[in-house]
Image (cartoon, coloured by chain):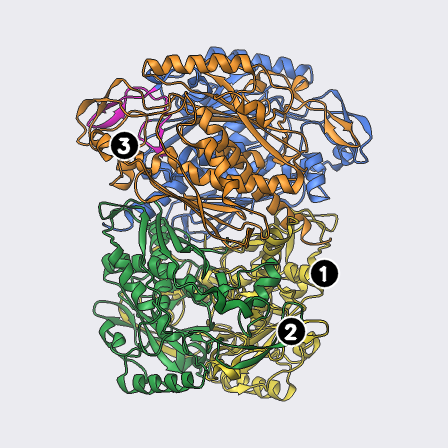
Chain colours: A orange, B blue, C yellow, D green
Amino acid sequence: MGNSFGTLFRISTWGESHGGGIGVVIDGCPPRLLLSEEDIQSELDRRRPGQSEITTPRKESDKATIVSGVYEGLTLGTPIAIYVPNGDHRPEAYKEMKDKFRPSHADFTYQTKFGIRNHEGGGRSSARETIGRVAAGAIAQKILKQANNIEVRAFIRRIHTIEAPEIKEFPSLEAVEASPVRCPHPETAEAMVNFIKKMRSKGDSVGGVIECRVKNLPVGLGVPVFDRLEADLAKAMLSLPATKGFEVGSGFAGTELIGSEHNDVFIEKDGHVGTATNRSGGVQGGISNGEELVFRVAFKPTATILQNQATVDSDGQETELMGRGRHDPCVLPRAVPIVESMAALVLVDHWMRHKAQCESFNF
Amino acid sequence: MGNSFGTLFRISTWGESHGGGIGVVIDGCPPRLLLSEEDIQSELDRRRPGQSEITTPRKESDKATIVSGVYEGLTLGTPIAIYVPNGDHRPEAYKEMKDKFRPSHADFTYQTKFGIRNHEGGGRSSARETIGRVAAGAIAQKILKQANNIEVRAFIRRIHTIEAPEIKEFPSLEAVEASPVRCPHPETAEAMVNFIKKMRSKGDSVGGVIECRVKNLPVGLGVPVFDRLEADLAKAMLSLPATKGFEVGSGFAGTELIGSEHNDVFIEKDGHVGTATNRSGGVQGGISNGEELVFRVAFKPTATILQNQATVDSDGQETELMGRGRHDPCVLPRAVPIVESMAALVLVDHWMRHKAQCESFNF
Amino acid sequence: MGNSFGTLFRISTWGESHGGGIGVVIDGCPPRLLLSEEDIQSELDRRRPGQSEITTPRKESDKATIVSGVYEGLTLGTPIAIYVPNGDHRPEAYKEMKDKFRPSHADFTYQTKFGIRNHEGGGRSSARETIGRVAAGAIAQKILKQANNIEVRAFIRRIHTIEAPEIKEFPSLEAVEASPVRCPHPETAEAMVNFIKKMRSKGDSVGGVIECRVKNLPVGLGVPVFDRLEADLAKAMLSLPATKGFEVGSGFAGTELIGSEHNDVFIEKDGHVGTATNRSGGVQGGISNGEELVFRVAFKPTATILQNQATVDSDGQETELMGRGRHDPCVLPRAVPIVESMAALVLVDHWMRHKAQCESFNF
Amino acid sequence: MGNSFGTLFRISTWGESHGGGIGVVIDGCPPRLLLSEEDIQSELDRRRPGQSEITTPRKESDKATIVSGVYEGLTLGTPIAIYVPNGDHRPEAYKEMKDKFRPSHADFTYQTKFGIRNHEGGGRSSARETIGRVAAGAIAQKILKQANNIEVRAFIRRIHTIEAPEIKEFPSLEAVEASPVRCPHPETAEAMVNFIKKMRSKGDSVGGVIECRVKNLPVGLGVPVFDRLEADLAKAMLSLPATKGFEVGSGFAGTELIGSEHNDVFIEKDGHVGTATNRSGGVQGGISNGEELVFRVAFKPTATILQNQATVDSDGQETELMGRGRHDPCVLPRAVPIVESMAALVLVDHWMRHKAQCESFNF
């Protein structure tokens, strides 16, 4: 409880930042899917530290091993366990964190909730945990691709106040990967990179907004009233470290429109029912409507900054803590594949749920 | 699956807008809680149509009956079933909706997903379903109050572009209920009411943002990594009809700050550890930190407008649909108790989960 | 939690023996199934008190109303709520039970666990709760019938030491219903009826064994390693009041065979793979193998006997309690439709789970 | 889904007989429990092959590594991952099994359900999977011991028709471990060992019955109506390979008593309420009553026998298969710690559930 996600395609992640390793167990994966470690590694490499000049220089190779659930290159339908050993262990780097709570981190809450914590690298609260999500998400994305050529594409829409213009076309993976900041609008991407570098040079950090789009979704995914598609997506996104908000379709800005401006009228579109606009973001009544799924996620500026900050220690005494170490000045570039992974996990799960309820029988 | 919410304090809602009635079953309620139908009715009355000049004039008394789980005024620990019969049935009002899909409603997606739908009043997709949530939420709020004097207070922060200034003090219930629009800032409330009336007179509708605050929460609620407190709150809120977004603490606006501006430094506060600012919104690492919980929810303008709109019919032919009937020009005033209810349900559930894992044993 | 059963076809029952009523909510039912109250009532009538000379003479009409989830005779895919009001309330009959714990009943454990109980008629621990199961089970049986002409047939195999010979042919519903004791072997049935009457005349009670068989099951239902088909059936059966044991196929007796006697060799059977014998009871490795599913359930003698028994009261003082009222001297005849219902619920759930994992995609 | 067990103390097992390894993730473990690999290894050694003259001579060291969730010897409250690498791989030993279905094994059903299987050593259907259960069960037993000095003790009650007399006293671990057959009655144990050896020399196999007893349980564990304590125990036991039946307290034999013989009258016992007899087996109304918990599990004779058996191949053609390899002629001695583990897992989970619902608040 708490470390598992999904109903039918269910993942359970485990592992702390420092210790034996990080892993994930995927239960419920359909059998007979062609799956290799390369399928997983390619996504992990997009998440990995040290991949570009604007991410942390930490060296973590993050090599994934499939330990079970695959036989002669095909999934068995039994649990797939994936294991990524930890490395690059420098416990001395965390000594000061043992007794001092880092501002806007999970140190204080973990310590108080559990009465104990592994303070090294944040322990379980480290974003390193998302390795398991990305590994599982790679499988989910492969399933979606094969099922209906469904593509899940996230990219950075805004860094601090530097915002890309609305991206009309579904962006290609190449366009997203063209810049280390994973914004498919080149001019904006360049400005973002420069701003991130500037903030890093000051030992400071920045946040922003990731947009995620999904195309070729069928109509019908999502289970009202509680497991609406956007509700499960919202949970998935807010379960990521550093996230502060989620919006679907017109989102918060849409609340500044009046009804007659906001409604998506239905039209005939290539022989099927579609909508003229997409303020719904591809979901109506909690169920996908066949239009592009569009949502955005807010990420706060990285909590670790290389500056001196006031804080208290484990005795409740006020003190100071100097941030040190090798950290991302901005988590968003590496969060792009994580957002895609979580979205894909939600979609595969809902695909299976939809088939189960609405297509198991011929009534 | 899909119509239940919560892990240990778990609710299951049922019922369509038209038909026998609406209800909820609450499983896992602690025993020996003093509970009466009045406790529930008082919250339902805040959600009920026809309560003010800016809500729908539909007459729905929404009288709740506790059918099980309470004995001699005390909860038994067995499932509490609450039943609210439907009334005011006018099937003829919905004739046109049988074959035409209302824009930005769930008609098309329900019909396509299930191959059938009850088109009268939206059937299961009607906001009438939230009656069950409010009934259960009334119980959850009573538990929180008794457990630690925890108060959950939602209010309207913004209607269209009319925004109340930041509310510094935790608003009293009286301040919220003073205006039919449930905004505790009187001048803003008046402007909001006027704007809603103006839009209604044009047959149009408006949306906005509800803010919710919770005080007196203990440290420790929330279960990383997936069942973070904000993740479960996000799911709860996005499971509500007409919601388009969720943000906690600094939210989307916080992404425009840099790390040194955004971090909440820890301070000693009345003998315990607190934070100087509250951009975290009361949650760090997915766990409540003892500060006020603060989140906001975006609601789109009501999809039903009393205007002629283009749409398609069930044969996929383009046509027009004239909105009619008695609808809320703005759902937010009636959504205030619904947001409070969902928040309370999440909090009671996490309270019980925290006790179970961290306080069952004395290690 | 605790009052729900199933994963995808999920039921939640509520209600105490005395109070407003008894009900069930079925979430996940496939849409477009033809369903009427008569479908449900016919099964409830088989469970109802007062149906024959060997059951309790209590008059409970147990009329079921479908309150939601069905529209114009077809299921909507939204939750089906079924409600059966309580009647025949005689609180004075239970006065003595308020302070004295009935031997081998749930009075003491409920009181101690919850710190409160509704002592009238056993409250939530009453077998009256199974009304909701039978109502839901009637729907599940209808689905199975339509899906693959699957039939679930339970009958009494043994009362006390009076045992029917092995029933080779799959018994017809008519053969089972021919006797009030629901044993399809007429001579044994007569002996059973006589024995039950004799015991009742002494104010005593009897137990026995129900056998359940299912034909036309496809291969593939059941999800190892924990949700094996027999594991979920075992849970379903042991969740019924008065049950003390479960066995599948050769069961306990099979442990007295050696491996070479016990194994079911595979043979070619009408063009598909079958087994020459069926000691596996239709399940191998937790998955249905296409043979008849066969299991048995042990029911203890009714705890309520019309005799004076030693007990203690709520102050822990030793006292005596005289059983009174109108009770079944033997619960098995009325338990037959309950066993069938629980089996059908497990099977529909696993059918949907199997389709979801193994047939959602074409890998 | 299907490879996880438990609600609050939840385990997920993974791994096939051959392949990378076998493991388990435990989510929800209370924090601050002193835990070492030795705690786990000592139980795994009781389950391990090659431990005595009556088990398989296969050499599997089954060394467990705790990969996460423990820090400086204490549990963190985050997921505990335990990993046991596979070894002693002899794929050639399984060649014939690739195309022929072993009688009374899971080969046919896995192949048909999933359309694929890892035939080596039974893949996921191998009893090797239970390593993860025993590792998790060792933790659960440690928790129970610390919580209330609760002891879970299983032992062999019957092999084939050789049955130990009723064991009146709660047997000590030493008494159980004194014989390789884990029957605490020395004369019976000797006869059992001799019989097993005799059957093995013929290439045949035997089954039997394991009894499990738990002492020092508090009153109140178990959640009616579906998650009764005995229902969850039944599911736990029937989820084990080779099990065919479960009974609690008087079980199947109790159905041959009449009510006045069977009822457990309440008495005052050392200052608390107890029962004079224990035909209830420690559970009443689905809730533990403070008496010793007593249940029994039927295990069929090992399906693998070293004899020639008829079967069919993957093309549906009839053929023969000669059992070979190193197998247990009787699974029961090694199943004793597995039964204890599953019982302990159920009990810890219900302990936490009870605390959550009934002791989180002071009503």
Q: Residues within 10 Å of mark 3 (few under 14, many from 20)?
A: many
Task: Pinpoint residue D12: horizontal percent, then vertical percent.
Answer: 42, 53
Q: Which residue is mark 3?
A: A108
Q: Residues within 10 Å of mark 1 (few under 14, many from 20)?
A: some
Q: Nearer the viewer, mark 2 or mark 1?
A: 2
Asked if D352 appears above or below B250 in the picture, the reply is below
What type is the residue that disc 3 sits on? Answer: Phe
User: Mark 2 or 1 closer to N-term?
Assistant: 1
Task: Pinpoint residue C287: horizontal percent, then vertical percent.
Answer: 56, 65
- Viewer-proximal residue among B297 and C20: B297
Q: Quadrant of residue D210?
A: bottom left
In the rendering, which numbered label is found on residue C362?
Answer: none
Q: Quadrant of residue B168?
A: top left
Residue at 43% across, 33% down: A240
* Range drawn in magenta: B263-291
Q: Which residue is mark 2?
A: C274
Q: Which residue is mark 1?
A: C146
- CB-based contact (under 8 Å), mark 2 and mark 1: no
Can residue B84 be seen here?
no
Left of D64 or right of it: where is D127? right
What type is the residue that disc 2 sits on? Answer: Gly
